[in-house]
Image (tube, rainbow, N blue to C red):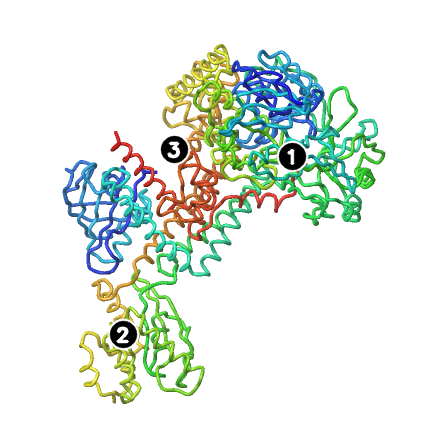
C-alpha cells in the first residue's frame, strides 16, 4: 500500500556530500526540499580518508564555497590539521587540505541541514521514481510506501546502490561502513531506461592509536599559518591547536606477505566485477604493478579528536583480514598494531554519465538530476561539487530560470562535469590538476573571483558577501594599477635593495610592476622601496602578486580561453539528428546523437569527432541560422 | 577560430611560373607588410583597397630577398572571404612560392585547413545558402585527400622519430604532473638542469627534422622520376652521383640492380623521388624477370623518365625496345660515358627525341651531374614536369607543426631560465606534444593520465 505523504518541490535521494550540497542549494533558493537518507546518523559521512581537499580537490572546495556551498565552511569548523600543499610550486597548484574530525564533520553538517529553512531530512529509503507520460518526474516513493510528489528529484546515492563489500573471500551485501545498502532503486532506474554501470573502490584499515609506536614514525605537523577554505573566514577566526599525521614505509616483509597471499584477493581471484580506479590502487596492486619499488609510503592519519581510530593511507586492500593484520604488523611502529576496522573493497551501481546534461539533469527524463559517486566520480569533493550544481540547476528549472553552467575555463567544477557528460568514464573519476587545461587561471586563490558572481545570481551568496567581494576586486585592480604607475628612480635605497636581493641595478626609472616581474623579487619584497605602501588585506596582496608575476602565462591562457569560448557559445539544439547531416562521418554522427552536445565546443571534445566534422557542423549551423532569417 | 589569419598556396603546384599565396584574416595585411619591401618603402597598411604593389618578399632573419612579387591588397568586406585578403603573386616558381608561404606562417598566420577559405566565405555570409552543401563537399573532399597524404604518406622512419620525441615529452610531463597531484609521495624531484638538457636534446632532434622537411624527405613523395636503361649503362652510378653517396650496388656484371631502388633527392628544394629500375631486357632469370616487370609498371606512373644509354656500346635491340616504350612520355635521354669512345648511333637517337631533351654527359663528372640537376630544376619551374601538390602542402604543414613545437619548447627553456615553477612549464610542454601529434595524427586525450599512473606508484 502506498500513500501520499506530501507535496514538495525537490526530493534529494542520499545524504552524503553530494546530497547535502544539493539539498542546501534548493532549500536556500526557497524551494521546499526533503533529503532522504538510509541513515540519518550517516549524513555527510566520510567512509574513507579523514580529510577534505588536497590537490585539485582543494580547488573544488573553494569553488563550492564561492558558489555559496557548505563544504568549505563545514571543514573550517571541524578540521584538526590544515596544510597548504605544493607551496614549492606555482600558485596554480597550491592546494589546501585539512584533516577532519569525521564525527564532528558529520554532526555539524547535520546541524546545518536541520537549521536550514525549507529543508527537512528523513531517514527513509527511496525505492522508486515516478514519472508521467512525458517522462517527467512527478514523485518519489519510499520503502514504506510513502509517496512524495515533487517537481524535481536529485539522485545522490553514492556507493549504496546494490552495494557489496569484500574482505578476502568474505562477501557481504552491505553499503559503506557496514551500513544498509539500497537494493531496489536500481530496478526503477533501469525501468526508466537509464544505463547502469558497476564500479568498485576500497578503503584501508583503521588501527588503534594506542597500539602504535610513534617513535618509529615521522611526524607530519600542520602549517603554522592556517588558510581557511571558506572565503568568508579568516585565518585567525578559525585558529586551533592541530593534531599531527605520521609517515612510515612498507618493506620486503610487507611485500612478501602480500605476494604470498595474492590468490586470496577477490580482485586477483576474479570475484569482483566492478572497475576499480587507477589512482587509488590497493596495496596489492601497487606491489604487483611496481615490483621494483622497494618501499611504499604509508600515512597514518587521525580520524578525529575524540577517537583512537587512525586511518592507514596507502594500505587500501581487499585481502583477507588475517593477511591485512600480518602485513600491517610488518610496518615500523606497527609491530603490535590492533586493527579496529578492517579494510574492504566495495562494488556498487552507478550510471553512464554521458546520459546527463551539463546541468546534471538526465537528457531523457525531465526533472531528474543526479550527482556524486552515482555519476561515476570518486571523492567527497567531486561529489559535493556536483551536488551544488545539480541543486542549483534543479532549483533554477523549477523557478523557470536559465540554467547555470560552469565551463572548463571557469572552474575545476566545469572540467569535472564536462568530462563526465562529454567523455564519460570507465573508472571512478578523480579530479586532477592535469585535467584542467586552463589551470593557471583556475587557481584556488581566485575561486571567489571566478565564481562569486554566479553564486550571487542564483541566490546562494548574500548581498553583503557580494559587496565585500566587489570591494576586494576593486582593491586588487587599484593596487595593480598603482604598481604600474609608480615609478622608482635610480636612487641609492633602490639600488641597495636590488643588490641585497641579487637583482640587476637600475639604469633608469622603472615601474614597481616591472620589478615585481623579476624572478628574484615579488610584491611583498618591493614594499621596501614602495614610496606609499598601502595596508591591504592578505587576500588582496596575494592576488596582486600572483596577477603581476604570472602575467605572461595568464595572458597566454586567456587567449586560449577566448578561442575556446567562441566554440562554446555556438549552441546546438538537442533535437538535431546528426545522421541526417550530410558530410558528417557516420562514426561522428552516431557519437553526436548519443551525447547531444550543447555546443560546438563540446562536440569538438567528443572522441571520434574530427576537426572536419566540426567544420561541417559550423556550416550546418550557419545554414540553419540563415534559414531562420528567411522565415521571418 | 574565425578570427585568426590563414594562408595557403592557391595555385596548383608546379604548373607554371607564377604561384599565388593567399592570406585571409584580420592580420593578413600587417603580416605581409612585415615581410614586404619595395623601393618606395610602401606601407601596405596605408595603401588603398584593391590595389597591386610591386616589391620583394624578404626573409627577415637572413635579411635576404626571397622573391620578386606583386602583392594585391584587398580589404574587408569586398573580398572572397569578407575578411582582409592579400594575394602574393610569386615569380620564382614553386620553390619561392613555398618559401614565401613559410615566411607568412612564421609571421603568425596559420596554414589553412582544407577548404577553409570557402568555409570562411560561407560563414561570413559571402556564399549563398544554396551552395552550403557544396561547401561541405569541398571541406570533406579536401580533407580526405589531405588526411591520406598527411598520414599514409608519412615516412615510417619519421613517425617513429616523432613518436619517440612525444614519448620523451610525455614522460617529462607525467613526472611534473605526478609530483603536482601527489605532492607527498616520494617522487624524485625534477632536476632543472637535467630537464633543461632533455628539452635541449628534444629541440635538437626537432630541428634536425625541420631541416629534413626542407630537403623534402619528410613524406614519401616527390616528382616520380624513373631511371631506365638496359643493364650496365650506368643507372646506379647516376643515382649515386645525384645522391652523392654509395647506395645502389654498382658492379660491372649486368643485372646487379635486381630490384627497384627508391631514393629521395632534393634539387633546389624540389623533392624528386628517384626510382632506379632493374634493366629492362628479355631475361630468363626469375628474380630479374620480376624486376623487369616492375620497371615497366613504373614507367606507366612516372612523372619523368630518364633514359640512359651507354655511348661506348652500339644501340641494341633492347635499347630500341625501351625507346619505343617511352616514346610519348616526358623524357630526358642521357648519353652516358662521354669519357669513353663513342660508338653509338647518335642520329637514331636525335631522330626520336628533341635536342633539348638529350644530354651528353658522364655520371662520373660532377659538373655534368650539376648540369643535369639544373635541367631538372628548370623543367619543374617551367612547369614541364609536375607533381601531386597535396604532398607539398603536407610537407609545409608538417614543417609548421614542427616549428611550433620547437618554439613551444623554447618557451619552456625560457621559463626554466627564469626559474618559473614547474607547473608553468607544462602548458608549453603540452603544446609541443600536441603539435607533434598533429603530424602523426594522434590526439592527446588520456595519454598523460595513463602515463602518470603507469609510471608512478600513487594513491591511497
Number of residues whose C-alpha sits closer than 10 Å to that of mark 1, classed few (under 14), some (14–19) or many (20 or more): few
Res. B187 in view: yes
Which image quarter: residue B48?
A: top left
The relative height of residue A214 versus residue B277 in the rendered view (above or below) is above
The one nearer the camera, A90 or B294, is B294
Give the position of the C terminus of chain B as an image quadrant.
Answer: top right
Q: Are marks 2 and 3 in contact (CB under 8 Å)?
A: no
Q: Picture coordinates of residue A264 (x, y %)?
A: 78, 46
Q: How far apart are the alpha carbons under marks 2 and 3? A: 65 Å
Question: Which residue is tagged 2?
Answer: B368
Left or right of residue A589: residue A73: right
Which label sits on residue A602? none
Residue with the mark numbered 1:
B184
Q: Quadrant of residue A167?
A: top right
Quarter of the figure with the N terminus of chain B: top left
The chain letter for the residue carrying disc 1 is B
Q: Is residue A599 left or right of residue A199?
A: left
Vertical side of A259 occupied by B324: above or below: below
Q: Residue at x 48, y 50 (%)?
A: B202
Camera-side mark, 2 or 3: 3
**For the point 37% across and 57% down, which residue is it?**
B149
Indicate the position of residue A493 as horizontal and vertical percent values. Answer: 45, 20
Please tell me which residue is depicted at 56% across the width and 17% down the height of the picture. Answer: A8
**How far is disc 1 from disc 3 in space, using C-alphas?**
42 Å
Exactly how many numbered labels are in the figure?
A: 3
Task: Give the label on residue A571, or none.
Answer: 3
Residue count near mark 3 (Cα–Cα under 10 Å), binned few <14, some 14–19, many ≥20: some
Q: Position of residue A302 (x, y in %)?
A: 73, 26
Q: Secondary structure at mark 3?
A: loop
> Looking at the image, is mark 1 or mark 3 nearer the viewer?
3
Chain letter for mark 2, please: B
Amino acid at each position: 500500500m502506498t500513500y501520499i505523504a506530501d507535496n514538495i518541490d525537490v526530493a534529494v535521494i542520499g545524504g552524503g556530500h553530494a546530497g547535502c550540497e544539493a539539498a542546501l542549494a534548493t532549500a536556500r533558493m526557497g524551494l521546499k526540499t526533503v533529503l532522504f537518507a538510509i541513515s540519518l546518523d550517516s549524513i555527510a559521512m566520510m567512509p574513507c580518508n579523514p580529510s577534505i581537499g588536497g590537490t585539485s580537490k582543494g580547488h573544488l572546495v573553494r569553488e563550492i564555497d564561492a558558489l555559496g556551498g557548505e563544504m568549505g565552511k563545514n571543514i573550517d569548523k571541524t578540521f584538526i590539521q590544515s596544510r597548504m600543499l605544493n607551496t614549492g610550486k606555482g600558485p596554480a597548484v597550491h592546494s589546501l587540505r585539512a584533516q577532519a574530525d569525521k564525527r564532528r564533520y558529520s554532526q555539524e553538517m547535520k546541524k546545518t541541514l536541520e537549521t536550514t529553512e525549507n529543508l527537512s531530512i528523513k531517514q527513509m529509503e527511496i525505492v522508486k521514481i515516478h514519472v508521467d507520460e512525458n517522462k517527467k518526474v512527478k514523485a518519489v516513493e519510499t520503502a514504506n510506501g510513502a509517496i512524495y510528489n515533487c517537481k524535481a528529484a536529485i539522485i545522490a546515492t553514492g556507493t549504496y546502490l546494490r552495494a557489496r563489500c569484500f574482505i578476502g573471500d568474505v562477501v557481504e551485501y552491505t553499503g559503506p561502513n557496514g551500513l544498509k545498502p539500497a537494493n531496489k532503486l536500481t530496478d526503477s532506474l533501469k525501468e526508466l531506461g537509464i544505463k547502469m554501470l558497476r564500479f568498485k573502490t576500497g578503503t584501508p584499515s583503521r588501527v588503534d592509536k594506542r597500539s602504535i609506536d610513534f617513535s618509529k614514525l615521522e611526524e607530519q605537523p600542520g602549517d603554522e599559518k592556517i588558510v581557511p577554505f571558506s572565503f568568508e573566514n579568516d585565518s585567525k577566526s578559525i585558529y586551533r591547536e592541530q593534531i599531527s599525521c605520521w609517515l612510515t614505509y612498507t618493506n620486503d616483509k610487507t611485500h612478501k606477505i602480500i605476494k604470498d597471499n595474492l590468490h586470496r584477493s577477490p580482485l586477483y581471484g576474479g570475484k569482483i566485477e566492478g572497475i576499480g580506479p587507477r589512482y587509488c590502487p590497493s596495496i596489492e596492486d601497487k606491489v604487483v604493478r611496481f615490483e621494483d619499488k622497494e618501499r611504499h609510503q604509508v600515512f597514518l592519519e587521525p580520524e578525529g579528536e575524540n577517537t583512537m581510530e587512525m586511518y592507514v593511507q596507502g594500505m587500501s586492500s581487499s585481502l583477507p583480514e588475517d593477511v591485512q593484520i600480518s602485513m600491517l604488523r610488518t610496518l615500523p611502529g606497527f609491530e603490535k598494531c590492533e586493527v579496529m576496522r578492517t579494510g574492504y573493497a566495495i562494488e556498487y551501481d552507478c550510471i553512464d554519465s554521458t546520459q546527463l546534461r551539463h546541468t546534471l539533469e538526465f537528457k531523457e527524463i525531465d526533472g531528474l538530476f543526479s550527482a556524486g559517486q552515482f555519476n561515476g566520480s570518486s571523492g567527497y569533493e567531486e561529489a559535493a561539487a556536483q551536488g551544488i550544481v545539480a541543486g542549483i540547476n534543479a532549483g533554477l528549472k523549477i523557478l523557470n530560470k536559465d540554467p547555470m553552467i560552469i565551463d572548463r575555463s571557469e572552474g575545476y567544477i566545469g572540467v569535472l562535469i564536462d568530462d563526465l557528460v562529454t567523455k564519460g568514464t570507465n573508472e571512478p573519476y578523480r579530479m586532477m590538476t592535469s585535467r584542467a587545461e586552463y589551470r593557471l587561471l583556475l587557481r584556488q586563490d581566485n575561486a571567489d573571483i571566478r565564481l562569486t558572481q554566479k553564486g550571487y545570481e542564483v541566490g546562494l551568496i548574500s548581498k553583503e558577501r557580494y559587496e565585500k567581494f566587489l570591494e576586494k576586486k576593486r582593491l586588487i585592480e587599484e593596487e595593480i594599477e598603482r604598481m604600474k604607475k609608480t615609478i622608482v628612480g635610480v636612487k641609492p635605497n633602490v639600488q641597495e635593495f636590488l643588490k641585497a636581493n641579487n637583482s640587476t641595478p637600475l639604469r633608469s626609472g622603472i615601474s614597481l610592476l616591472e620589478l615585481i616581474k623579476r624572478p628574484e623579487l615579488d610584491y611583498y619584497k618591493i614594499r621596501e622601496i614602495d614610496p606609499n605602501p598601502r595596508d591591504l588585506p592578505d587576500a588582496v596582496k596575494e592576488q596582486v602578486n600572483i596577477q603581476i608575476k604570472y602575467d605572461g602565462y595568464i595572458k597566454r591562457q586567456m587567449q586560449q580561453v577566448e578561442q575556446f569560448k567562441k566554440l562554446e557559445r555556438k549552441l546546438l539544439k538537442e533535437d538535431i539528428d546528426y545522421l541526417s547531416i550530410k558530410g558528417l562521418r557516420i562514426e561522428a554522427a552516431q557519437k553526436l546523437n548519443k551525447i547531444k552536445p550543447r555546443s560546438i565546443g563540446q562536440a569538438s571534445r567528443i572522441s571520434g569527432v574530427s576537426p572536419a566534422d566540426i567544420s561541417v557542423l559550423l556550416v550546418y549551423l550557419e545554414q540553419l541560422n540563415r534559414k531562420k532569417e528567411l522565415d521571418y | 577560430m574565425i578570427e585568426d589569419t590563414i594562408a595557403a598556396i592557391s595555385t596548383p603546384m608546379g604548373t607554371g611560373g607564377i604561384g599565388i599565396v593567399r592570406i585571409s584574416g584580420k592580420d593578413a595585411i600587417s603580416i605581409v607588410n612585415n615581410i614586404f619591401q619595395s623601393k618606395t618603402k610602401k606601407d601596405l597598411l596605408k595603401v588603398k583597397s584593391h590595389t597591386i604593389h610591386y616589391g620583394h618578399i624578404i626573409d627577415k632573419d637572413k635579411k635576404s630577398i626571397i622573391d620578386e612579387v606583386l602583392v594585391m591588397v584587398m580589404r574587408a568586406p569586398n573580398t572572397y572571404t569578407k575578411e582582409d585578403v592579400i594575394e602574393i603573386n610569386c615569380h620564382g616558381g614553386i620553390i619561392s612560392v613555398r618559401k614565401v608561404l613559410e615566411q607568412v606562417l612564421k609571421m603568425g598566420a596559420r596554414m589553412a585547413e582544407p577548404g577553409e577559405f570557402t568555409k570562411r566565405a560561407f560563414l561570413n555570409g559571402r556564399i549563398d545558402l544554396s551552395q552550403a552543401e557544396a561547401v561541405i563537399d569541398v571541406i570533406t573532399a579536401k580533407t580526405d585527400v589531405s588526411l591520406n597524404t598527411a598520414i599514409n604518406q608519412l615516412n615510417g622512419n619519421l613517425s617513429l622519430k616523432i613518436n619517440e620525441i612525444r614519448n620523451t615529452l610525455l614522460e617529462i610531463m607525467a613526472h611534473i604532473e605526478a609530483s603536482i597531484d601527489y605532492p607527498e609521495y616520494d617522487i624524485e624531484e625534477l632536476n632543472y638542469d637535467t630537464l633543461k638538457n632533455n628539452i635541449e636534446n628534444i629541440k635538437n632532434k626537432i630541428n634536425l627534422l625541420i631541416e629534413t622537411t626542407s630537403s623534402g624527405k619528410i613524406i614519401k613523395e616527390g616528382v616520380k622520376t624513373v631511371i631506365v636503361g638496359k643493364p650496365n649503362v650506368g643507372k646506379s652510378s647516376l643515382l649515386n652521383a645525384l645522391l652523392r653517396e654509395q647506395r645502389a650496388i654498382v658492379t660491372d656484371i649486368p643485372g646487379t640492380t635486381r630490384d627497384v631502388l627508391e631514393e629521395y633527392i632534393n634539387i633546389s628544394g624540389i623533392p624528386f623521388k628517384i626510382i632506379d629500375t632493374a634493366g629492362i631486357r628479355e631475361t630468363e632469370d626469375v628474380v630479374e624477370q620480376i624486376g623487369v616487370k616492375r620497371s615497366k609498371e613504373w614507367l606507366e606512373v612516372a612523372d619523368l623518365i630518364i633514359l640512359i644509354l651507354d655511348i661506348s656500346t652500339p644501340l641494341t635491340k633492347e635499347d630500341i625496345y625501351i625507346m619505343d616504350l617511352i616514346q610519348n612520355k616526358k623524357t630526358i635521354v642521357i648519353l652516358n660515358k662521354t669519357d669513353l669512345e663513342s660508338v653509338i648511333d647518335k642520329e637514331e637517337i636525335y631522330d626520336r627525341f628533341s635536342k633539348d631533351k638529350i644530354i651528353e654527359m658522364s655520371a662520373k663528372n660532377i659538373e655534368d651531374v650539376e648540369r643535369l640537376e639544373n635541367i631538372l630544376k628548370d623543367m619543374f619551374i617551367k612547369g614541364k614536369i609536375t607533381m601531386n601538390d597535396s604532398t607539398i602542402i603536407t610537407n609545409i604543414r608538417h614543417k609548421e607543426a614542427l616549428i611550433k613545437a620547437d618554439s613551444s619548447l623554447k618557451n619552456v627553456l625560457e621559463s626554466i631560465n627564469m626559474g618559473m615553477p614547474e607547473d608553468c612549464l607544462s602548458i608549453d610542454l603540452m603544446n609541443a606534444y600536441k603539435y607533434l601529434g598533429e603530424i602523426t595524427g594522434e590526439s592527446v586525450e588520456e595519454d598523460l593520465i595513463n602515463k602518470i599512473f603507469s609510471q608512478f606508484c600513487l594513491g591511497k
